[in-house]
Amino acid sequence: MFISQRAQRTSPSPTLAITAKARKMREEGIDVLSFGAGEPDFDTPEFIKDAAITALREGFTKYTPTAGIEPLRKAICDKLWRDNGLKYEPNQIIVTCGGKHALYNTFQVICDPGDEVIIPAPYWVSYPEMVKLADGVPVFVYADESTGFVPTIDAIREKITARTRAIVVNSPCNPTGAVFPRQRLEEIADLALRHDLYIISDEIYEKMVYDGHEHFSIASLGEEVKKRTILVNGMSKAYSMTGWRIGYAAAERELIAAMTRIQDQSTSNPTSIAQRAALAALQASEDAVKQMVTAFAERRRAIVDGLNNIPGFRCAEPGGAFYAFPNVSALYGKRWGDRVLNNSDAFAEYLLEVARVAVVPGSGFGADENIRLSYACSLDTIRNGLARIAEAVQALG
Ligand code: PMP
Ligand code: GLU
């Protein structure tokens, strides 16, 4: 069957794949504990669901403007002012089908064939694929535990060429949990101004920061930096609304207009009633968000300490998001039957098959010495999961 080159060279999302596999095993009656997709286990707060139900009952079930309803775009402007000190007008906002879609539209709008996008690694699995889908070229800058998974400015600078169009900043970071220090953001902003680059700032984990770490939006470093920044955020993580598919981007009016044209010809507006739910979420107090973050902080302590107690695991302290990203390479070379566990895929497969624990191999994030565990799950799951992993690791001898 004919399948386009574009589709053939697109890999499936490993985070979604591992989660689907764990779900299927559970449906088959196998007791699997999942640390797979980054999806809060909390239900969407009741008042948010009520807003959607009201919208539904009112018959708010038709197309909306492609870039989202005006009150929601206004509420997003208010949020960006309140939380990030950023002043945007509603025509500088596009509401999208999740933050993922905002990023997809962004790369479609800023990349011509061969344009390079600098992506700090370890990176979220979808950035390189989305850049390639826009005929761009992902260029990676690697960082490891020794720099807290934050690339040095020299390492970033070395990757800039005449073809560089943009740099991605994802702080707090999925998968490492790194929160970029303000100084590094200033240096990145400086590079962007000097080399005429866009900054794509994915701030979807902004609310999940711990131990005195603070989120800082790079766009707030000044008017010129803001003009070059495409800020992406969404409702999935902070409000436990992954299935509702509402995200957004904020940027210069021309960029938003271009993204809206792409959206006009692809998805049209995000779901009408989900937009009304998002509006309710953004207009309410942040109590529900704070409760979730308090729970994440407790889980983070439990998982990081627990992982560091397993021989062969070395887990850096994540400042934000809800992922632990231990280095397990000390265990590479161990035997599992007639196989040798010599990379993160094999190691994750071993944990799934033997410990019945689903984790995401680091390979998809550009870090084959690591595995990712989402701790957006219950403390019980964490305790039991760690016990299973410890037992499976011990069995390796
Ligand atoms: N950015 C990052 C770094 C993420 O981890 C995710 C997780 N899905 C997203 C964007 C997009 O999330 P969503 O499409 O659910 O808003
Ligand atoms: N972003 C989440 C994760 O990394 C959800 C899955 C996805 O969209 O990749 O697990």
Image: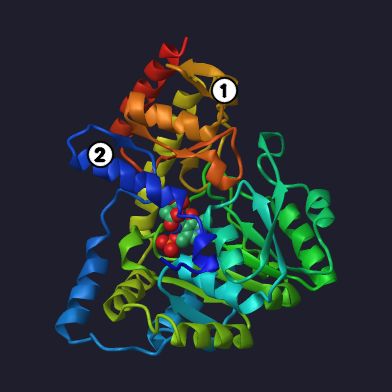
Name the residue at the top extreme.
397
Circle 1 SS class: loop
Residue 111 drawn above or below residue 74 = above
Residue at 30% across / 34% down in the picture? 33
Q: Provide the secondary structure element on which disc 2 rests.
A: helix
Residue 327, above or below 1 = above
Name the quadrant containing residue 178.
top right
Q: Does any portion of residue 329 appear in the rendered image?
A: yes
Residue 107 pos. (x, y %) = 60, 72
Residue shown at 59%/21% (left/top)? 330
The residue nearer to you, when weighing 105 against 44, is: 105
Image mark for residue 25: 2
Residue at x 29% of width, y 51% of height: 42
Q: Quadrant of residue 133?
A: bottom right
Which color mode does the image show? Answer: rainbow
Residue 209 point in image, percent of width and height: 52, 48
Q: Earlier in the sequence, mark 1 or mark 2?
A: 2
Q: Position of residue 343 (x, y in %)?
A: 55, 31
Badge 1: how crowded within 10 Å, few (<14), some, or many (20+)?
some
| Identity of the residue drawn at 36% across and 50% down | 292
| Residue 204 visible in the current orientation | no
- Residue 52 lies left or right of residue 304; in this view the side is left
Q: Is residue 382 above or below residue 116?
A: above
**Mark 2 C-beta to ligand 2 under 8 Å:** no
Badge 2 crowding class, 10 Å Cα cut-off, few under 14, some 14 to 19, many 20 or more, is some
Q: Identify the residue under disc 1.
A: 332
Q: Examine the rendered structure and indicate whether residue 186 appears above or below residue 342.
A: below
Q: Is residue 172 left or right of residue 114?
A: left
- Which amino acid, mark 2? Met
**Amino acid bearing label 1:** Tyr
In 3D space, how far apart are the residues under numbered discs 1 and 2 (Cα atoms)?
26 Å
Image quarter hosting the N terminus: bottom left
